[in-house]
Image: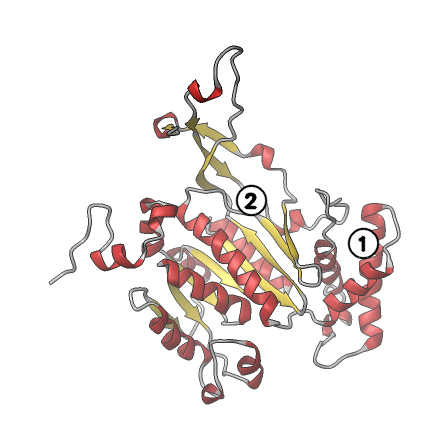
């Protein structure tokens, strides 16, 4: 006998388990339970992200045939010593099913062809290779599917986010309240107003801006570190730098690229603390560190829930995290003034006094 569904489309079991629909909205929750997120490789950041969206009701497909290593056991909460040498994706599938039995957790041994990827709601990778990021970024643009890449670099990390070529979502409008002279503010009806936004994310190459000047009060040097690694890895010799097989000469050459990028972008010399940050970022590039990747996975999962629900504004371009200073910033490089908006007057809500 099929499980009875509520009028909103959730089963009774889902209705009881996913009480967060009171906060994110029932339509968003329905979209979550119908979603299918492709997660390629269960690295630390991706494991944290997967755990969070599964608990929220999303379904995932894992593509990972790597074997569990000692490094996985040491850095990833999902794996224990008993899992050494076993298929990482299959172990992850088993563990995630225990976290939320209502979610569909699938494992595939091979990555689907590019044109078959359109059956997924979102694609997630965790790679340090920009050529791989560029490949999935192109697929995201062509198939109009959101794509996320999470990478931990020791004390630092970043998330690359594109929503595809044409992504529509709703958000609450920023309304300027008018005050009428002689009228009490509490007597003026106030409303929440909403609008539909159509966002066109640009390709990755368009948001690797070597002349970019960071916005806001706090300068985020992680973005310049990303640019440093992107440019360094275009050099065949520097691309061979391996954090597990340290080479001081190659590391210093990578740092010099970061210094040059910083100098040309900001028209000033970097302080020693910035140079040290470039060096640590490159030295630990792609190395998982649990306190940092937990934050990357948590932030990315929150933004992913917004993207799947489409009833809140998701982040785009870059989330850059500095674990030493314990702060993260979203760096929106592209021009968002071109995003189209449309009022939704039928969703206007009176704010109760």
Q: Nearer the viewer, residue 305 or 207?
A: 305
Circle 2 packing at 10 Å, graded few (<14), some (14-19), many (20+), is many
* Cα–Cα span, label 1 and label 2: 24 Å
User: Which residue is drawn at the image coordinates 35% and 59% (left, top)?
Assistant: 57
Identify the secondary structure beneath mark 1: helix
Residue 27: give x, y in percent of width and height.
32, 45
* Residue 166 relative to residue 327: left or right: left
Quadrant location of the C terminus? top left
Identify the secondary structure beneath mark 2: loop
Pointer 1 with pointer 2, Cβ within 8 A: no
* Residue 2 relative to residue 158: left or right: left
Q: Quadrant of residue 241?
A: bottom right
Residue 261: which disc?
1
User: Which residue is drawn at the image coordinates 63% and 42% (left, top)?
Assistant: 334
Q: Is residue 162 visible?
A: yes
Residue 219: which disc?
none
Q: Is residue 126 visible?
A: no
Question: Colour scheme of this structure image?
Answer: secondary structure
In the image, residue 276 sits, relative to residue 69, either above or below, namely above
Q: Quadrant of residue 289?
A: bottom right
Residue 229: give x, y in percent of width and height.
72, 62
In the image, residue 85 sits, relative to residue 237, either above or below, namely below
Of the image marks 1 and 2, the number of the one nearer the N terminus: 2
Quadrant location of the N terminus? bottom left
- For this orientation, the residue located farthest to the left is 1
Residue 66: give x, y in percent of width and height.
50, 79
Residue 201: which disc?
2
User: Which residue is drawn at the image coordinates 70% and 80% (left, top)?
Assistant: 244
Residue 347: give x, y in percent of width and height.
36, 30
């Amino acid at each position: 006998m099929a499980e009875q569904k509520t009028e909103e489309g959730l089963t009774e079991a889902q209705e009881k388990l996913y009480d967060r629909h009171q906060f994110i909205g029932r339509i968003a929750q329905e979209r979550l339970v119908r979603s299918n997120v492709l997660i390629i490789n269960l690295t630390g950041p991706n494991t944290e992200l997967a755990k969070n969206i599964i608990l929220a009701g999303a379904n995932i497909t894992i593509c990972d045939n790597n074997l569990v290593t000692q490094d996985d056991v040491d850095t990833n909460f999902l794996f224990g010593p008993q899992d050494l040498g076993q298929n990482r994706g299959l172990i992850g599938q088993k563990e995630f099913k225990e976290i939320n039995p209502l979610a569909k957790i699938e494992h595939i041994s091979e990555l689907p062809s590019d044109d078959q990827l359109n059956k997924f709601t979102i694609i997630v990778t965790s790679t340090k290779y920009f050529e791989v990021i560029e490949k999935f970024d192109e697929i995201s643009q062509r198939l109009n599917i959101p794509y996320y890449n999470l990478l931990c670099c020791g004390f630092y990390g970043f998330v690359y986010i594109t929503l595809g070529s044409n992504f529509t979502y709703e958000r609450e409008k920023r309304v300027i309240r008018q005050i009428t002279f002689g009228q009490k503010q509490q007597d003026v009806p106030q409303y929440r107003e909403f609008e539909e936004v159509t966002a066109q994310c640009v390709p990755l190459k368009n948001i690797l801006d070597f002349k970019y000047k960071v916005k806001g009060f706090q300068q985020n040097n992680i973005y310049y570190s990303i640019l440093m690694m992107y440019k360094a890895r275009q050099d065949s010799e520097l691309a061979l730098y391996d954090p597990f097989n340290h080479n001081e000469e190659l590391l210093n050459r990578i740092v010099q690229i970061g210094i040059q990028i910083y100098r040309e972008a900001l028209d000033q010399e970097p302080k020693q603390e910035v140079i040290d940050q470039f060096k640590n970022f490159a030295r630990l590039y792609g190395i998982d560190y649990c306190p940092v990747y937990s934050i990357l996975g948590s932030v990315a999962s929150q933004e992913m829930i917004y993207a799947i629900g489409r009833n809140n504004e998701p982040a785009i371009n870059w989330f850059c995290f500095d674990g030493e200073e314990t702060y993260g910033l979203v760096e929106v490089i592209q021009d968002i003034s071109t995003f189209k908006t449309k009022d939704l007057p039928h969703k206007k809500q009176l704010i109760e006094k």
